[in-house]
Amino acid sequence: MTKKKQSKKTVAVIGLGYVGLPLAILTAKKGYPVYGFDLDKKKVEKIKKNISPFKEEFIEERKQFLSKINASTDPTILKKADVVIVCVPTPVDEKFFPIFEPLISATELIINNRKPEQLIVIESTINPGVCEEVLLPLFQKANLVDGKDFFLAHCPERINPGKDAVSKGYNVSNIARVVGSTSKKGLLLAQNFYSSVIDAPIKAMGSIKEAEACKVVENSFRDINIAFVNELAKSFEKMDIDVKNVIEGAATKPFAFMAHFPSRGVGGHCIPVDPYYLIERARESGFDHKFLRVAREINNSMPAYTVELMHDLLNELEMPIKGTSVGVMGLSYKANVDDLRESPAVKIIEELEKKGAHVVRFDPYIPSMSDAKNLNDFLKKSDALIFVTNHKAFSSVDAKTFKKFGIRAIVDGVNSLDKEKIKKLGIKYKGIGRR
Ligand code: SAJ
């Protein structure tokens, strides 16, 4: 599809977080006049001073565009926009039901500060049906007609936080997207807009529901594949087969296999959450996603399983877990980000404390949660370790360092330590599905 040069419409992004801020920067970089709305005054002030409110490679490398975003906490800026993009969180409650309040209040801001014939794109992750069943009724209540007074579309975000995204070269500017709409014109407007800012294919879906379903399917796919290897890890641990080696062996097959790796658990605000959107919505239509539920149960069991491995190692050393100082090395849910959302570390700490262990926490990305001022101080305070997050900052730590600080036992929650070297130095070692 030829990239139609868009007359420079004015764009407003609601929600300047991991998803919204990179998109606002990209849109500004492409020459659009961009407004950014966020409820968080501090965040807006930082952006106005060309400071990124959080660590994100993509933003760090394009900080000069921060000042091009007219960031504000005043919703009346939305009246200036021809295109409004909603990038607000859609978390789940303790029963894993999606919480739509942020999305509903963003929609109400749009309704109360509108410009005729706006394209309104929801990027937040939502389950199939939310646009038509939750959002459209809000417009109808205000006597606004979709496809005439405004054009509603959905383009699920595909942000990939953390260094690994940059190392793979993916970022908001070059990841293909899908778009869906409730009207033909809305679909065209959305596809043209995203084609003008993203250098990758923009696939038009047959309906807005299909676009909503794509995201939850993508992330449920990842969750079930991680559950598969987590179950393998538990099985192979009993057969003394190194599951990491087996997965790497299977991955030499150049087709029909996609490597995932077992770990201490699945964290973040996407993967462990999105399958519940599908499970709950399908339940309302009378379908039970047994397979997705079982995969969630397997992944949710991994933090406790990891602590059991540590308990086993301490028993082998005849060291009661009660009173032993167990270091939790890394708190964030994945490497090189400062994000605790759904992090397995939180559950690992709970399980250790339930067993009476003395927990020492350390994460260079989250100093406020750390019980040690630096890595050496952390290792000094620990008798045993659970390695939770393989931050780049930890890559310099080797088996000799652990030995030097008298570490007796290590559970490698991300299977990324050199098990042979560690065992050779007489330190007890268990990985997730590898000994
Ligand atoms: N994890 C495993 N084993 C794996 C992969 C991940 O245990 O093989 C764990 C991670 O440690 C983490 C959790 O799962 O705790 C989620 O990891 P993730 O790599 O999926 O990271 P996220 O949550 O940042 O996922 C995002 C998602 N992107 C979007 O939703 C737009 C996801 O779809 C991407 O596949 C993922 O980034 C990515 O590939 O990095």
Image (cartoon, grey):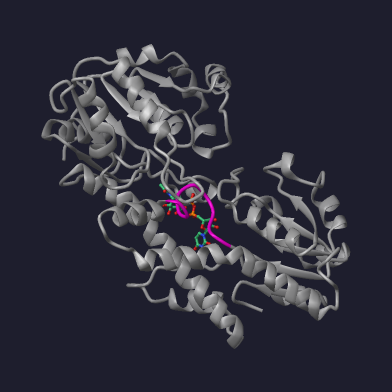
Image-based side of 166 in relation to 391, left or right: left
Q: Quadrant of the C terminus?
A: bottom right
Image-based side of 107 in relation to 1, left or right: right
Q: What is the quadrant of residue 317 in the picture?
A: bottom right
Residue 244 locus on image (x, y percent): 55, 74
Residue 357 locus on image (x, y percent): 80, 62
| Residue at 48%, 48% in the rendered image | 165
Residue 202 locus on image (x, y percent): 24, 42
Residue 127 locus on image (x, y percent): 32, 47
Q: Nearer the viewer, residue 123 or 291?
A: 291
Outermost bottom residue:
239
Q: What is the quadrant of residue 46 in the picture?
A: top right
Q: Nearer the viewer, residue 132 or 116?
A: 132
| Residue at 49%, 30% in the rendered image | 62
For the record, the magenta segment spans: 265-273
Determine the main secondary structure of the stretch shown in magenta.
loop
Vertical arrangement, residue 57 with respect to residue 381, above or below: above
Magenta stretch: residue 266 in it? Answer: yes
Vertical arrangement, residue 215 with respect to residue 404, above or below: above
Magenta stretch: residue 169 in it? Answer: no
Q: What is the quadrant of residue 189 in the picture?
A: top left
| Residue at 76%, 45% in the rendered image | 370
Residue 411 in view in this figure = yes
| Residue at 37%, 38% in the rendered image | 124
Give the mark count: 0
Q: Quadrant of the N terminus?
A: top left
Vertical arrangement, residue 172 with respect to residue 137, above or below: below
Residue 87 in view in this figure = no
